[in-house]
Amino acid sequence: MSNQVKWVIFLVTAVLGVIALIYAVIYLSVGIHSLPAFVPGHKAGVNGHYHKRALLTGVIGVVLLAISAMMAISARRSTSQGTIGSGSTPESSRTTPEQA
């Protein structure tokens, strides 16, 4: 997998993970009857909170953030290994007066 693909996966999973954690907080902090219309499960006239949905979206958010962290670490390692092991470092390309 190329570095660019890894960075794209990192960004997408990080954004989705943060959104999932925001939804988990919304499910826990707002009553069912007060949920915003864009949140799945919005029902008028019902009391309580969605604890199961909050738990599920929280777990999904944490898993997505863990995946994004692994992708970022993997992309950074392959970037640093590609520049170190390539043999094109400035020190290796210099010639000394004795070599010339």
Image (cartoon, rainbow, N blue to C red):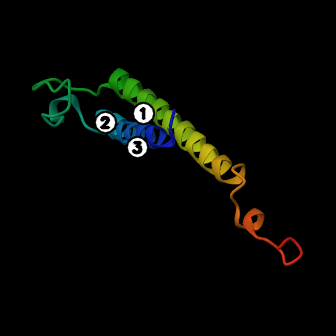
Query: What percent of the width, then of the height, locates residue 58?
Result: 42, 31
Q: Dot 3 lies on which element?
A: helix
Q: Dot 2 lies on which element?
A: helix
Is 95 left, or right, of 61 in this rendering? Answer: right
Is 39 left, or right, of 23 in this rendering? Answer: left
Type of the residue with mark 1: Gly
| Residue at (59% x, 43% y) in the render | 73
| Residue at (71% x, 53% y) in the render | 84
Q: Earlier in the sequence, mark 3 or mark 2?
A: 3
Alpha carbon separation for disc pair 1 and 2: 9 Å
- Residue extending farthest front: 100
Q: Nearer the viewer, residue 32 or 57?
A: 57
Alpha carbon separation for disc pair 1 and 3: 14 Å
Type of the residue with mark 2: Tyr
Mark 1 residue crowding within 10 angstroms, few (<14) / some (14–19) / many (20+):
many
Q: Nearer the viewer, residue 17 or 32?
A: 17
Type of the residue with mark 3: Leu
- Residue pointed to by mark 2: 23
Residues at discs 1 and 2 in contact (Cβ within 8 Å): yes
- Residue pointed to by mark 3: 11
Alpha carbon separation for disc pair 3 and 2: 18 Å
- Residue extending farthest right: 98
Quadrant containing the C terminus is bottom right
Q: Nearer the viewer, residue 42 or 38?
A: 38
Q: Nearer the viewer, mark 1 or mark 3?
A: 3
Q: Nearer the viewer, residue 35 or 80?
A: 80
Residues at discs 1 and 3 in contact (Cβ within 8 Å): no
- Residue pointed to by mark 1: 61
Q: Which image quadrant for residue 29?
A: top left
